[in-house]
């Protein structure tokens, strides 16, 4: 694993601090031995004692950015283990260990923080925090809450239940009382955020993306329970129009996917401050027709078209947008493809960068610690060899992410120069 933290200085880079302000051509960042930013700004303002930094990197010709935040991943869905029937036959230890590569690929792509919305447990998060394995800092949802027969119900007509494994918290709930109890159970298991299924989905066997899931009162009970536990956030998987509206009216913090969101619901989201996490990476990725069930392929193609029709208007409306990819459904490590897709759907490059930094941090209630390069925040920093404003698509190539620093620790360094 990585060594102990030392004072670290990045100097002579082009600084894009994540605040929407003008970039600095000759900038730098100083991180102290506690992993927090001590100074950031133009090099002519560098404090005199910074020359004593334990690690100094001259990164002239490269861009300095805040570490990116992906608000919607499934690290437990490794590429080879996405098929639910295959997953049901594998040892739990193998599924857990497969997370290691997913986290490494995510971190090396420039994502220093993720919100895992179902699939990993508290032990995985603790292993990262204790330095046992390398990965981004994490918020976890443990198990999403679903109505019987909804998107989270993996029980087939034969009675085979692919969602039931020893030690896995059940998310099936019907009625306000059960929903409140399930919320308490996932919080007891270590959830930082609660996820609910407000609609059906593409990959679930017995529903459609425009089927409505939990009702407004059921979802409101979960939102209230989250509020009672340090005002934690609730994320709603919501693809069809009716379920999106229900989730927003019930008071969720974010709409995940939102493929069929309409103008009136967008207006309500703006009024309430509800975030949209559009997961455009998965919304624009066509599955391998021969590798998925025919019914899922048909649903996917239909809802890709709906997303392309509805989401551009929503993104340009002024609603708060945060980056989320649904990686785990698509390949881990492709996270920053989302930035390009956001621009394709109507955001400016700077607004896309803000969606992946400042906005995402605020959604996760971590704005005081991450999301921009500012004094006192964690030294979560990405160095890119490409101009993120002029050609944002190049950030999706992991090879153009030449350094990744998390909490002041250099996790990745493929830049040519070495510390002085």
Image (tube, grey):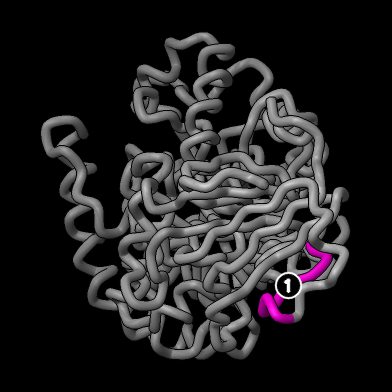
Q: Which residue is disc 1 drawn over?
A: 40
Query: Residue at horizontal 61%, vertical 64%?
Result: 66
Is residue 364 something one can see in this rendering? yes
The 10 Å Cα crowd at callout 1, few under 14, some 14 to 19, many 20 or more, is many
Vertical relation: 196 (above or below) 37: above
- Asked if 214 appears above or below 132 in the picture, the reply is below
Q: Is residue 255 visible?
A: no
Residue 213 lies left or right of residue 275; in this view the side is: left
Whether residue 194 appears in magenta in the rendering, the answer is no
- For the magenta stretch, what is the residue range? 37-44
Q: Position of residue 55 (x, y in %)?
A: 72, 47
Vertical placement of residue 277 versus 173, above or below = below
| Residue at 75% from the left image edge and 29% from the top image edge | 131
Q: Main secondary structure of the magenta part?
A: strand
- 178 lies left or right of 284: right
Residue 253, x across and y down, in percent? 65, 69
| Residue at image coords 35%, 58% | 337
Pick whichever, 379 or 166, lies toward us: 379
The residue depicted at 39 percent of the width and 70 percent of the height is 387
């Amino acid at each position: 694993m990585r060594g102990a933290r030392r004072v670290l200085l990045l100097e002579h880079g082009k600084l894009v601090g994540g605040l929407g302000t003008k970039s600095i051509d000759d900038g730098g960042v100083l991180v102290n031995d506690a992993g927090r930013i001590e100074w950031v700004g133009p090099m002519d303002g560098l404090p005199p004692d910074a020359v004593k930094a334990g690690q100094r990197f001259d990164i002239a010709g490269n861009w300095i950015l805040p570490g990116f935040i992906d608000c919607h991943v499934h690290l437990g869905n490794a590429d080879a283990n996405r098929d639910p029937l295959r997953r049901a036959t594998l040892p739990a230890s193998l599924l857990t260990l497969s997370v290691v590569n997913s986290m490494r690929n995510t971190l090396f792509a420039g994502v220093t923080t993720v919100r895992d919305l179902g699939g990993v447990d508290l032990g995985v998060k603790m292993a990262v925090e204790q330095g046992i394995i390398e990965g981004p800092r994490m918020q976890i949802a443990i198990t999403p809450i679903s109505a019987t027969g909804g998107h989270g119900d993996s029980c087939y007509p034969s009675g085979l239940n692919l969602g039931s494994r020893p030690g896995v918290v059940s998310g099936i709930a019907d009625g306000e009382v059960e929903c409140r109890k399930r919320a308490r159970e996932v919080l007891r298991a270590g959830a930082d955020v609660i996820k609910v299924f407000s609609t059906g989905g593409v990959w679930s066997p017995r529903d459609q993306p425009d089927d409505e899931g939990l009702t407004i009162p059921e979802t409101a009970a979960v939102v209230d329970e989250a509020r009672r536990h340090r005002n934690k956030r609730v994320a709603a998987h919501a693809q069809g129009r009716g379920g999106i509206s229900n989730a927003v009216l019930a008071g969720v913090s974010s709409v995940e996917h939102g493929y069929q969101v309409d103008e009136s619901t967008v207006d309500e989201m703006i009024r309430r401050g509800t975030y949209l996490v559009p997961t455009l990476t998965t919304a624009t990725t066509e599955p391998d027709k021969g590798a998925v069930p025919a019914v899922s392929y048909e649903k996917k193609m239909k809802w890709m078209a709906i997303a392309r029709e509805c989401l551009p208007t929503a993104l340009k409306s002024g609603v708060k947008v945060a980056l989320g990819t649904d990686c785990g459904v698509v390949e881990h490590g492709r996270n920053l493809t989302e930035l390009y897709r956001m621009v394709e759907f109507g955001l400016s490059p700077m607004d896309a960068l803000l969606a992946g930094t400042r906005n995402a941090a605020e959604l996760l209630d971590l704005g005081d610690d991450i999301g921009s390069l500012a004094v006192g925040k964690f030294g979560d920093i990405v160095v890119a060899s490409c101009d993120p404003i002029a050609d944002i698509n190049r950030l999706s190539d992991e090879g153009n992410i030449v350094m990744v620093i998390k909490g002041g620790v250099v996790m990745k360094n493929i830049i040519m120069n070495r510390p002085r």
